[in-house]
Image (cartoon, rainbow, N blue to C red):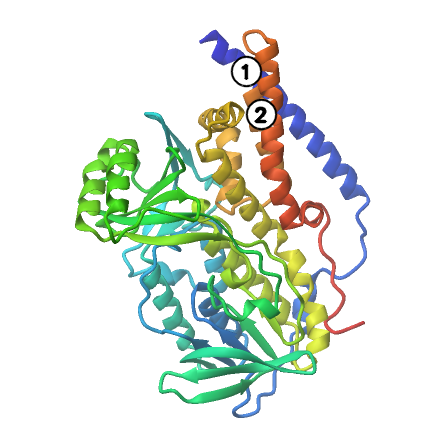
């Protein structure tokens, strides 16, 4: 008991030192910030003007009507843009991801006027996470005390949510949704002028617009000309629907630190719990020949909380096992006049933290705000230069969530390396301390506090906490060496992710506000 108290005092001193250093650094930097320039949000109203529409013309073509595409169509349409949305399949989707919206993402829905899209679809409120490891558990609540509105996470069937967003977009008179498959972008002299697509009836159509926004998802066939796609597949999900059982922590997501990698469980309707079993590597057991069922029953089932085991085994026996490769792709844009990428076609991360929809909706808000002051979009080269600020503005939210997803997946996965095992245990114990030690990381995960500097601070605080555990009650050469390896492992996890996400720009964005010149002024 006394040792635990001593550990907490040591940890408190470590974290206080980190926080003090960070505060001094940021205050010092802020003193040198420029006080001139135009803040974008202040200039928005100044440059907003009435748009003159020509019958039949299109301002923006949106490829894809998923979460990002539907939200963008509604928000740009409400701003007076004439929108054509081309979606491959406007029917009800049946997906196994995109079923948990973090509180930060729900706040973006409010900003976009789309919060009613989680109503009447049997969605449930989510107030945090429960973490399980070797028979122990800890509850991590979202820090929602400061929010007056009905802010929390939401879980639901993805298809129902997307259909509600499409229906909402279709209520805007100048938004047209059309079912068709976009086969290519139409280019002229290095600029995108529109798209070529085939309708459901087989008609080949070319549609022109000053701006094309590609939101056609993780399997995008259009992204190659607009970014530098480096898609990694670290693992796959085996998905089950558990019925007639209750989760240990109602209205919470459940993360089980299993062997070899995490398992996720969360309720997506009043009668169903989604269970996602992560399987590392590119080769997974076959569903068709029964290998997957055997793997889930023998390897995974014993690690599931007792309250969910009967439902888990019943779901395996039912045979409705779906699989999906988990893709990760850092944002690496190739700015192209007349077109931009958005959503999973542009940027993906491991779905462990459920941050994909939050990133997509945050990007939609940024694009909407950037386009609002523009009277027309016809100068594609000037527009391309102007929209370059989008890639900087998205950094705090996107890069924080992306980095956290990649780092947590590696930390939460089992490893034969003793230093990595110590780091995993340190992370569980750190979060179990409660207070700022859990509220800080969960605020990052939920999108409520998208600060990359805070992410780095907490990540290395976990590592230092792990070293402190090793050195108590007294250090030894073996434990000291293991502590050094732990710090090295932590660095090898987070620094490559920070580099891929653009670390310098990401950290500086939280220190210095972005200043804008007036639209299309050189």
Q: What whole-number distance in Å separates the C-alpha atoms at marks 1 and 2?
A: 10 Å
Residue at 51% across, 47% down:
447
Q: Which residue in the protein does label 1 denote?
A: 470
In-image side of 334 versus 329 (left or right): right
In-image side of 304 versus 513 (left or right): left
Q: Height in image: 252 above or below 59?
A: above
Residue 301 placed where, x, y %? 26, 36
In-image side of 63 versus 373 (left or right): left
Q: Nearer the viewer, residue 446 or 347?
A: 347
Element type at marker 1? helix
Q: Which residue in the protein does label 2 denote?
A: 486
Discs 1, 2 touching: Cβ within 8 Å = yes
Q: Nearer the viewer, residue 1 or 262?
A: 262
Specify whether residue 248 is in view: no
Q: Nearer the viewer, residue 421 or 401?
A: 421
Determine crowd level at label 1: few under 14, some 14-19, many 20+ residues with C-alpha closer than 10 A.
Answer: many
Q: Height in image: 9 above or below 183?
A: above
Residue at 41% across, 37% down:
261
In-image side of 497 versus 421 (left or right): right
Residue 57 placed where, x, y %? 55, 89
Determine crowd level at label 2: few under 14, some 14-19, many 20+ residues with C-alpha closer than 10 A.
Answer: many
- The quadrant the C terminus occupies is bottom right
Residue at 54% across, 47% down:
401
């Amino acid at each position: 008991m006394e040792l635990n108290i001593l550990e907490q005092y040591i940890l408190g001193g470590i974290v206080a030192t980190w926080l003090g250093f960070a505060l001094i650094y940021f205050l010092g930097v802020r003193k040198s910030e420029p006080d001139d320039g135009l803040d974008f949000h202040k200039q928005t109203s100044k440059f907003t003007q009435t748009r003159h529409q020509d019958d039949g013309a299109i301002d923006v073509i949106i490829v894809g009507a998923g979460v990002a595409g539907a939200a963008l169509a509604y928000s740009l349409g409400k701003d007076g843009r004439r929108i054509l949305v081309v979606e491959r399949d406007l029917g009800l989707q049946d997906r196994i991801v995109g079923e948990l919206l973090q509180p930060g993402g729900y706040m973006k829905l409010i900003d976009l006027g789309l919060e009613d899209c989680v109503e009447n679809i049997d969605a449930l409120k989510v107030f945090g996470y429960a973490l399980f490891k070797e028979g122990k558990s800890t509850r991590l609540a979202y820090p929602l005390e400061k929010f007056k509105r009905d802010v929390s996470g939401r879980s639901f069937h993805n298809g129902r949510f997307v259909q509600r967003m499409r229906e909402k977009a279709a209520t805007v008179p100048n938004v047209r949704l059309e079912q068709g498959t976009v086969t290519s972008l139409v280019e002229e002299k290095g600029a995108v002028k529109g798209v070529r697509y085939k309708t459901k009836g087989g008609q080949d159509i070319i549609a022109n617009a000053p701006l094309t926004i590609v939101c056609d998802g993780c399997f995008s066939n259009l992204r190659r000309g607009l970014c530098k796609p480096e898609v990694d597949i670290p693992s796959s999900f085996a998905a089950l629907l558990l019925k007639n059982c209750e989760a240990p922590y109602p209205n919470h997501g459940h993360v089980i630190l299993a062997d070899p990698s995490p398992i996720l469980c969360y309720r997506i309707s009043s009668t169903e719990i989604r269970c996602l079993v992560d399987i590392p590597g590119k080769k997974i057991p076959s569903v068709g020949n029964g290998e997957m069922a055997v793997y889930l029953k023998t390897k995974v089932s014993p690690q599931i909380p007792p309250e969910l085991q009967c439902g888990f085994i019943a779901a395996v026996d039912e045979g409705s096992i779906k699989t999906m490769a988990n893709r990760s792709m850092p944002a690496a844009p190739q700015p192209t006049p007349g077109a931009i990428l958005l959503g999973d076609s542009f940027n993906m991360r491991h779905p462990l933290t459920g941050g994909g929809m939050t990133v997509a909706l945050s990007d939609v808000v940024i694009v909407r705000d950037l386009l609002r002051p523009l009277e027309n979009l016809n100068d594609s080269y000037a527009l391309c230069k102007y929209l370059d600020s989008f890639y900087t503005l998205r950094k705090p939210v996107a890069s924080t969530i992306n980095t956290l997803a990649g780092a947590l997946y590696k930390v939460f996965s089992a490893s034969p390396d003793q230093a990595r095992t110590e780091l995993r245990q340190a992370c569980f114990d750190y979060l179990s301390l409660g207070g700022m030690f859990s509220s800080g990381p969960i605020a990052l995960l939920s999108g409520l506090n998208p600060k990359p500097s805070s992410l780095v601070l907490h990540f290395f605080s976990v590592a230092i906490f792990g070293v402190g555990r090793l050195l108590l009650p007294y250090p030894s050469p073996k434990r000291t060496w293991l502590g050094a390896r732990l710090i090295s492992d932590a660095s090898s996890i987070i620094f490559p992710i920070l580099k891929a996400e653009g670390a310098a720009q990401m950290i500086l964005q939280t220190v210095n506000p972005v200043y804008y010149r007036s639209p299309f002024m050189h």
